Amino acid sequence: MNIVVTLKQTFDTEAKIALKDGKIDDAGVKQIINPYDEFAIEEALKITEADGGEVILVSVGGSETVIRTGLAMGADRAVIVSDPELADVDEWAGAEALAKAIGTLEYDFIIGGRIAVDDGSAQVGIRLAEALGIPSVSSILKLEIADGKATAVREIDGGTETIEVPLPSVLTAQKGLNEPRLPSMKGIMAAKRKEIKTLTLADLGTSAAELAAKAKITDYSLPTPRTAGKVIPGEPAEAAAELARLLREEAKVI
Amino acid sequence: MDFQLTEEHDMIRDTVRDFAENRCGPGAEERDENEEFPVDLWHEAAELGLSGITFPEDFGGAGMDYISYAICVEELSRVDPSMGVTISAHSSLGSNPINLFGTDEQKEKYLTPLATGEKLGAFGLTESMAGTDASGTRTTAVLDGDEYVINGSKLFITNGYYADTYVITAQMDKEKGNKGISMFIIEKDTPGFTFGKKEKKMGIRSSATYELIFENCRIPKENMLGEQGKGFKQALTTLDYGRIGIASQALGIAQGSYELALKYSKERTQFGKTLSEFQITQFKLADMEIKIDAARLLVYKAAWIADAHHTEGSGVTAADVSKSAAIAKTFASETANEVARQGVQILGGYGYTRDYAAERFMRDAKITEIYEGTSEAQRMVIASHILRD
């Protein structure tokens, strides 16, 4: 069974976000594999370790350094779509580029993260399935592959539902699907020898004009910084009365 | 000249840091309190490959360089210095002598399971009358037919009791002094090999430290490691490499103490200001950072020299390894003690309680100035290299 895992490079979850010239400043920021994509890698590795086959990582953008972490976890090889012409990638363009890159591969199904922790759009996996004309199941918590079918338990409001889809299809991983492994020392050494293929837009038979973003980000703003908390001194009864007064008159919440 | 670590080094740091913070961190305080050796964590570390970082892939290792090893021990010790020394003693002391001096058969039989982490290793050199002066070795080995008969005891053995494979030194010809000492591999559960008391220590309390006792313990003749009469010299070489591990442990302790003090200083307010806004704290933090940075450069340089020594045509000698490792260990261990002491000071009363790791780091730091050669012994080593020419 060959499994394609879609990866996105994102800021480290502990990175401090700063704006520069109206854009997010990535200077000095540590980049990682989107944590939800790690669930996807883990699930793919578990399946191929049991049944054989290859795990192929596919990413639009992303550095070799970050993608190699996925290879160190145990994936077999990687494909990166990288082109200086591809500057602004929205969800549509990202999915189209992924679809073209994945189109060159032989695979049984595709799995990726439910959402990227940077822009949080949760669209690309589903758009990818649309672009390829195959079914998709999002936010999966459990997966079984048998007889050319995927049986996935997915998260819905207040519960779960179980969906069966034919393969190939696109699945997106929700937190809880598994516990991603750390790259082992041997994995890190082995990753050095694994193939990372870089494809340009021309290699995919497309161009920057064809993949021009349909959505345009007009402005970024940072959340208002949290102000320091206030300690109300005094006897419990007095302090409680003062708290109620402040909630009513200053915070205007009661 | 390039101070940039490689992509692999960064990946190793990320992996070990994640493991240290998420697996070793929770429970470190409790294990310290209960003086409990974490068998399960050792197995998890082995699963990650931390048991055989520098050993050849042919013998179950990862085939990585000493800088990788230094980063690993540093990152473990930044969170849990006991775990740092468990890996360091297993790798540098228990396993490396077999890697350096063993025959292919010995490597196949003993190094492979140590490198894969199937087995835990330990090393026995110190005795009650043989500390810095190893010539006081009283443990004896006598050939009897196809077996050596070992008698004596070894003191303060890290990973003792829990380890499966022990490399020890024993005297075969007292007349010859140090040149009568040889090295042997002894497996746990060999009849005549038992354990004495478990040491109650000031720090690294969840690292196991035991006495090894040999009473007519018979081991096969082929378990002599290296050359007969070269055991003392082999032990010194083993310690040269081992000191890179302890220097890395000290570096990690310093880093952990510093980060805790830095975080606390930005949160704790007195006189309406955070501690970090007082110049006295700022200068303390700056001094910590200066020393840690210098220690890290020395530790990584020693690791780099160890790697270069194994690279053909580098011209880097065994003496270079010995000298640079001694320098790194001396400076890093003294840095760990100074930084941990200042760390407690910045946390004040809280730092003195066991609610914060600051006091644990301070207790754990002390041993790095003592084991695998005291700071005084390191200065003897360094001076002997300086005065050789």
Image (cartoon, coloured by chain):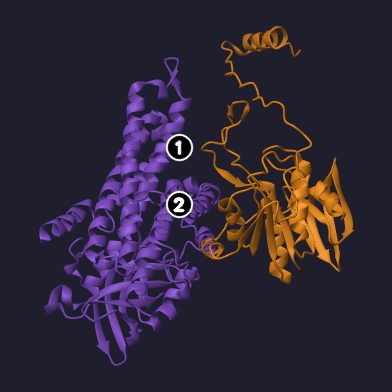
Chain colours: A orange, B purple
Label 2: which secondary element: helix
Dot 1 falls on a residue whose secondary structure is loop
Asked where in the image residue A199 lies, by quadrant, the reply is: bottom right
Contact check, label 1 and label 2, Cβ < 8 Å: no
Image height check: is B319 above or below B15?
below
Residue B76 badge: 2
Question: In terms of image quadrants, where is residue A87?
Answer: top right
In the drawing, does residue A9 fall left or right of residue A30?
right
| Residue B187: percent from left, percent from top | 40, 76
Q: Earlier in the sequence, mark 1 or mark 2?
A: 2
- Residue sitting nearer the eye, A244 or A228: A228
Q: State the image coordinates of residue B232 (x, y, percent, origin top left).
A: 22, 71
Disc 1 and disc 2: Cα gap in Å? 18 Å
Q: Are marks 1 and 2 on the same chain?
A: yes
- Residue drawn at the location 41% of the way across and 65% of the way down: B54
Please, which chain is the residue tagged with disc 2 on? B
Asked if B126 appears above or below A113 in the picture, the reply is below
- The reply to whether residue B389 is in sight is yes
**Other-residue count near label 2 (Cα within 10 Å), few / some / many at <14 / 14–19 / ≥20:** many
- What type is the residue that disc 2 sits on? Leu
Q: Label 1: which residue?
A: B356
Residue type at the position of mark 1: Tyr
